[in-house]
Image (cartoon, rainbow, N blue to C red):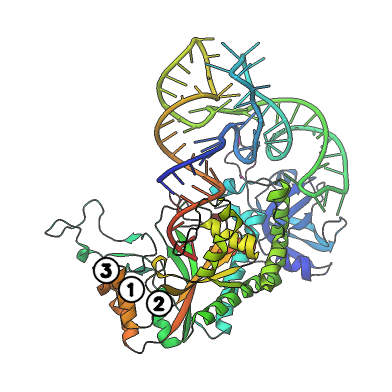
Amino acid sequence: MLPKQTIKTLLFDSQPGLSVHIKGWVRTFRSHRFISINDGSTIHNLQCVVDFEKMDDQLLKRITTGSCLSIKGLLTESLGKGQRVEVQVESIDILGDAEADPEKGDVYPLQPKAHSLEFLREIAHLRFRTNTFGAVFRIRHAMTFAMHTFFHERGFFNIHSPIITGSDCEGAGEIFRVSTLDPSRPPLTPSGEVDYAQDFFGKQTHLTVSGQLEAELAAMALGKVYTFGPTFRAENSNTARHLAEFWMIEPEVAFADLNDNMDLAEANLKYLIEYALKNCNDDLQFLNQRLLDEEKNKKKEERSEMSLIERLRFVAEQEFERITYTEAIDILQKSKPNKEKKFQYLIDGWGVDLQSEHERYLVEKHFKKPVILTDYPKEIKAFYMRVNDDGKTVRAMDILFPGIGEIVGGSQREERLTKLQERIRELHIPENNLWWYLDSRKFGTAPHAGYGLGFERLLLFITGMSNVRDVIPFPRTPHNAEF
RNA sequence: UCCUCGGUAGCUCAGUUGGUUAGAGCACCUGACUGUUAAUCAGGGGGUCGCUGGUUCAAGCCCAGCCCGGGGAGCCA
């Protein structure tokens, strides 16, 4: 039976004298007397005190780190210093043992000590039970909830864009094919190619790389929409910022221009940060301390100027710096590292794409706050972005965050049919695959804008973790789909 | 995919110019103690040194290939 009480309510809202029935997992068992138990409702553990002289010795021996217990007892004021209340144990049922002795079987791998994140990644099925990942995934939930709240409060409608799609048009990277054909003996056409007409959908299909194009169609009727779903990229990128399966939020707004788009994105990010500060305080305090402890091992020069929580407050309060690509190139060209040739890629003129080192310089050294870059050269941006009157730049915007880089990428969309077709031809995109998208420009087209927000990158910033593989429960990366 | 660093006990790591029986802390087992906060104290068990091949009288250490992981880069969110 599900207990009515959680450790969270017992620790913070309950008074001594209460009868307690609690179920949870043992974190530590000290001095044969103190069981520290956690049920996931909060990062804090409940201390359960047993009178070992009255308890069965065989039962006590089975109370190991990781085992699952059902405990009945009385809530009392704590005699010790670490907690307000504790439970005087009356009875214990062991719901699940966790072996600690290697001679008796497979040992529960988590110990009451700090483990490396790399080790925990290899036991992703158990890492939920650590303080760090408990905090991270409670915050991930809170951010999911806050994301929907943010858009709902502003009159947006959530659109479920398809996961399997038949259009390979955005050029947003390599795709994962979806097929039910037998890979070893696929049906062939007379000319010897794989005959996808006989495949499940009667054509080639793949996992979505973005819900944007579908969201644009919905925005041309519902006005303000957003998607929030998984996205798949089969790119062989091995970095702390990339996943083969990640979650993206993509708002799309009719009658909005690039300035509206920037306003929305900035408000969106600040709302989430403020929500976390307000509602995830315990977990953030823990992650804050975790980072401080980690920094103690670093050299002074490598330590960050602000703690996690200070950084969150700072970004929530700051106006993001808004500059054009052209202005950014100017700043970078005149910058010290460019003049002293410290950049690996020197900025020698207008038109080149910015590298990570340049984005970091702008955000972390020059402005020292989030930066929104706009109006990039059209050559380095996607076909659907609205061309400016200069004919050279497009109404694109990227939001760059300290320590993370690009967290948002968006644009005002090209709503003029002929201009859009021009761009499609310039980039040699097969137009007939996009007939449904072009229809939105044929029939009642309207100016509109939107962006994509990488959910895991946002979580990196909010939790202070440094690898996206540690903010998604089961990361999918090249050569890794174990769980 | 490229560059770079690494892989030694269940975990975190040390291991000297190649040289006898590969160490420590935590975890585990036995005992002591009992209001602890990753409890403490004493004793004990635990190793295919990532894999394969090579050099050498001798390889954890040197060389080659492969596998796995971290960091950085590219691609991007």
Circle 3 residues within 10 Å: few <14, some 14–19, many ≥20: some
Which labelled disc corresponds to residue A346?
none
**Magenta-highlighted residues:** A99-109
Circle 1 residues within 10 Å: few <14, some 14–19, many ≥20: some
Q: Position of residue A462 (x, y in %)?
A: 63, 64
> Which residue is label 3 attached to?
A201
Q: Is residue A404 visible?
A: no
Of discs 3 and 2, which sits in the foreground? 2
Q: Is mark 1 on a helix, strand or loop?
A: helix
Q: Which amino acid does label 3 sit on?
A: Phe
Labels 3 & 1 near each other (Cβ < 8 A): no
Name the chain under label 1.
A
Question: How many discs appear?
Answer: 3
Relative to A476, say whether B60 is above or below.
Answer: above
Circle 2 residues within 10 Å: few <14, some 14–19, many ≥20: many
> Which residue is label 1 attached to?
A423
Instruction: Tell me if A197 is positioned left or right of A54 in this view.
Output: left
Q: What residue type is labelled 2?
A: Val
Which labelled disc corresponds to residue A387?
2
Q: Is residue A465 visible?
A: yes
Q: What residue type is labelled 1?
A: Arg
